[in-house]
Amino acid sequence: MTEHQMGSIFDVKTDPIKFLIVDDDQVTVMAIKRALRKLKIINPVVVACDGQEALDMMRGECEGDKLLPPYLVTLDLNMPRMDGFEFLEEVRNDPSLQRAVIFVLSTSDAPKDVAAAYSSNIAGYIVKDDLGDSFIRALNMIDTYTKVVELPH
């Protein structure tokens, strides 16, 4: 195989991974956006204020365009209307959404919450105990994850 042929193997066009932030706390949303900018992550970012709005976006049932994969979801657990656990149940029972990659970002470190989230096949559980350096490291890890792992479309 020539060098030109080998190079063409890696010239595959991929869609940028979109970040879907599902959180009702505007301070957290702003902290996530600020951390993404600080890390120079330029991927598209979409925000839903609760699980129902996020589902509507993912299913194309809202006023905007359908949020097409690939996307990575950061999910808070404690939200009005539809909380994170209800969202996880809906997503995992929907054949068109069940492969979504979801990281929980929650203030809860209760073992029952962690276990319940992992039983819904999340990719990771991060406690947002402070929005400082550990939070930025967590988002950096998520960004690295998106660059290393092949996500479903």
Image (tube, rainbow, N blue to C red):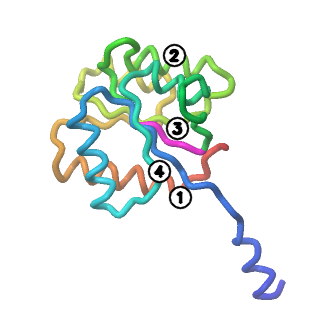
- According to the picture, the residue beneath numbered tag 1 turns out to be 148
Residue 81 position in % (x across, y down): 37, 12
Q: Is residue 111 above or below residue 4?
A: above
Circle 1: is it few (<14), some (14-19), or many (20+) Cα within 10 Å? few
Q: Quick one: SS at disc 2?
A: helix
- Compute the Cα span from label 1 to label 2: 27 Å
Q: Which label's residue is closer to the chain start, 2 or 3? A: 2
Q: Residues within 10 Å of mark 3 (few under 14, many from 20)?
A: some
Contact (CB < 8 A) between labels 4 and 3? Answer: no
Label 2 Cα crowd, 10 Å radius (few <14 / some 14-19 / many 20+): few
Q: Position of residue 5 (x, y in %)?
A: 81, 81
Q: Which residue is mark 2?
A: 89
The residue where tag 3 is placed is 101
The amino acid sitting under disc 4 is: Pro
Check disc 3 and give the amino acid type.
Val
Q: Where are the magenta residues, as a range? A: 70-74
Name the dominant secondary structure of the magenta segment.
Answer: strand
The residue carrying mark 4 is: 44
Residue pushed farthest right?
A: 1
**Label 4 vs label 3: CA separation?**
16 Å
The residue lying at 65 percent from left, 43 percent from top is: 152
* Magenta span contains residue 71: yes
Is 105 placed left or right of 132 in the picture? right
